[in-house]
Every structure is written in C-alpha cells, then in structure tokens.
C-alpha cells in the first residue's frame, strides 16, 4: 500500500466524520463495516490511520478533547477584557460552533469502553479548571467558586439539549441572562 492510496481520507477526516456518525447513531455506528459503507472507503483506509478499533476510539476522544476543549480555550485565551466578558465569549463560542455537540456521546462511549474513561475525565477536569479560573478572577472563593464552576460547566455541556427547540440565534440571545444568573452576587 502506498500513502497516496488513502490520502483523500486523512486521519482528521476519519475522526471528524466518525464523530458525526457517533452523534447520530451512538456507539453502534462506529463499527468498521458501518463506517466504510457510509464513507465509501476501504478498510485499508481505516487501517492506514488506526491500528485497531481501540486505537480509533482513543483517537476519537483525543480529537474531541482537542476540537471541543483545547481549541476553545486557546480562542478564549486571546479574548481581552474582564473575566465575565471572557466567560460570556466562552459561552457564545460553545453555542455558535456547537462545541458541546459530542459531549454526551463521548461520555457514553467511555461507558462502553472503560479504557477511555480517564481521557474523558481529564477533559472534564480541564474544563472545570478553566472555568474555575474565570470565576476566581471574578472574586469567587470556596464553596461559591466550586458551585458556580460546576453549574456553568454542566449547563454549557447540556445547553444544546435543554434548548433543542431554539435556533442558535435564540440560544445566543439567552447568553446574557444565563451569564447574569451564573455571575450575580448578593
């Protein structure tokens, strides 16, 4: 086999396309036969990029972590302004670019494949730490810091499901109200 045989289906394309299948069909959609049929590629293309199904699923979780967490954090790190404004921009970016779209299915995948649990947990911990730093910069401490962090991360991971009947524009329009609720101090 030569590399050019499989060049049209890069590792990134496999991962991005497979995440869509996972979101649509769940764990069962990740069977190799199912994927090669949908993508109109050969099994050789899969094995060019992945050793086996375990390597593939591990790469899927890594891809999710990179695209739905690290890229988001890097983008928000470039935003100037007060911590509350940065949190608002974080919430807006997550909604506009649907970064939480795969959170539930990846978590479910880690239930099916226990070896993935540490990676998924590390992503959740990274997100908590990132948001915790924003709330800490707003002056939150102790239990207040912990609770606001958890509420914000949990809400952003489930926001799309909670607002399934709304357009993205409607969901973005709700962000100031959501932010006020999460940041209001008495």
Image (tube, rainbow, N blue to C red):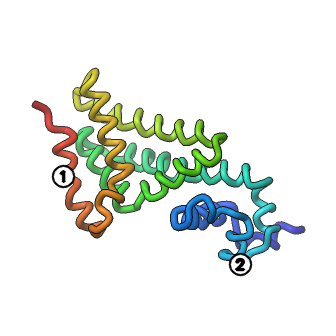
Q: Position of residue 160 (x, y in %)?
A: 35, 59
**Residue at (23% x, 66% y) in the render:** 170
Front residue of this view, candidates 65 and 108: 108
Please state if 74 lies on the left or on the right of 119 as rendered. left
The image's mark for residue 40 is 2
Q: Report crowding for label 2: few under 14, some 14 to 19, many 20 or more residues within 10 A (C-alpha).
A: few
Labels 2 and 1: the sequence-earlier one:
2
182 versus 174 height, above or below: above
Q: Secondary structure at mark 2?
A: loop
Residue 132 falls in image quadrant: top left
**Residue at 78 percent of width and 70 percent of height:** 6
> Which residue, as the protein is rendered here, is positioned at the far top?
142
Residue in the foreground of this view, choosing between 100 and 139: 100
Labelled disc at residue 2: none
Is 100 situated left or right of 112 in this image? Answer: left
Residue at 41 percent across and 50 percent down: it is: 75
């Amino acid at each position: 086999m030569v590399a050019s045989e499989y060049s049209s289906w890069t590792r990134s394309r496999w991962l991005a396309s497979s995440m869509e299948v996972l979101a649509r069909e769940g764990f069962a959609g990740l069977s190799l036969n199912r994927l090669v049929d949908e993508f109109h590629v050969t099994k050789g293309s899969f094995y060019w990029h992945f050793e086996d199904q375990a390597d593939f699923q591990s790469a899927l979780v890594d891809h999710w972590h990179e695209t739905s967490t690290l890229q988001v954090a890097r983008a928000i790190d470039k935003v100037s302004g007060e911590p509350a404004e940065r949190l608002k921009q974080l919430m807006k970016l997550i909604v506009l670019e649907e970064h939480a779209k795969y959170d539930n299915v990846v978590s479910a995948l880690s239930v099916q494949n226990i070896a993935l649990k540490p990676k998924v947990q590390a992503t959740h911990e990274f997100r908590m730490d990132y948001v915790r730093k924003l709330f800490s910069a707003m002056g939150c401490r102790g239990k207040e810091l912990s609770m606001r962090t958890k509420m914000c991360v949990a809400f952003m991971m489930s926001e799309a499901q909670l607002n399934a009947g709304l357009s993205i524009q409607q969901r973005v329009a709700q962000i100031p109200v959501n932010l006020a609720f999460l940041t209001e101090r008495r």
